[in-house]
Image (spheres, rainbow, N blue to C red):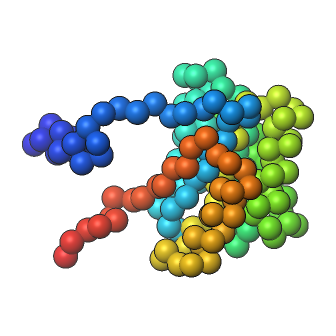
């Protein structure tokens, strides 16, 4: 049963493995998704995996300016896995935070920036505009959309 589900999911996702593109210096990954989908946790797991398996020196960036607990969550996670976190808690502009983080990464020799953005309870125009503004400002190598297992569930 597990193999059938795995094979069907693999086929649904395109059927082929695609490596993450990290060509920029620093390489930039933009995380997006709905609130509570696991963006922050996945950002930390991705940073840890890329640091250990790909010898990257990542910097996690807290760009959720709406939920102070999200910034704290990323800081705690970064401390637990030994990955530094860039945040500007007094700044309410996620584009500025992302750009400042890239400058920080260049200045301190980080070769990967993972930008953890704010999610919403539903996809809305404000969320899409904010993600687009960050994307246009930082020109990420990859944009990852995180969804939880309940997305698309039929009842």
Query: Which quarter shows the N terminus?
Result: top left
Query: Which quarter shows the C terminus?
Result: bottom left
Q: What residue do we see at 33% from left, 58% from top? A: 149
The location of residue 150, given as percent across then percent down, is: 33, 65
17 shown above or below 146: above
Q: Is residue 124 left or right of residue 113?
A: left
Task: Name the residue nearer the viewer: 97 or 36.
Answer: 97
Residue 121 appearing in the image: no
Task: Name the residue nearer the viewer: 149 or 115.
Answer: 115
Q: What residue do we see at 74% from left, 55% from top? A: 137
Quadrant for residue 50, please give it: top right
Q: Is residue 147 left or right of residue 96?
A: left
Quadrant for residue 24, please give it: top right
Q: What residue do we see at 82% from left, 28% from top? A: 109
Residue 97 appearing in the image: yes
Q: Is residue 100 left or right of residue 116?
A: right
The location of residue 46, given as percent across then percent down, is: 55, 39
Q: What residue do we see at 72% from left, 50% from top? A: 138
């Amino acid at each position: 049963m597990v193999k059938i589900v795995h094979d069907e999911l693999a086929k649904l996702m395109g059927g082929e493995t695609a490596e993450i593109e990290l060509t920029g210096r620093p390489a930039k990954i933009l995380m997006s998704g709905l609130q509570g989908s696991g963006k922050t946790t996945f950002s930390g797991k991705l940073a840890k995996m890329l640091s250990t398996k790909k010898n990257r020196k990542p910097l996690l960036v807290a760009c959720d300016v709406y939920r102070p607990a999200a910034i704290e969550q990323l800081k705690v996670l970064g401390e637990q896995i030994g990955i530094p976190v860039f945040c500007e808690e007094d700044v309410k502009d996620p584009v500025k935070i992302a750009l400042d983080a890239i400058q920080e990464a260049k200045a301190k020799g980080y070769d990967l920036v993972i930008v953890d953005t704010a999610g919403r309870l539903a996809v809305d125009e404000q969320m899409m505009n904010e993600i687009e503004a960050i994307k246009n400002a930082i020109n990420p190598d990859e944009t990852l959309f995180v969804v939880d297992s309940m997305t698309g569930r039929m009842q």
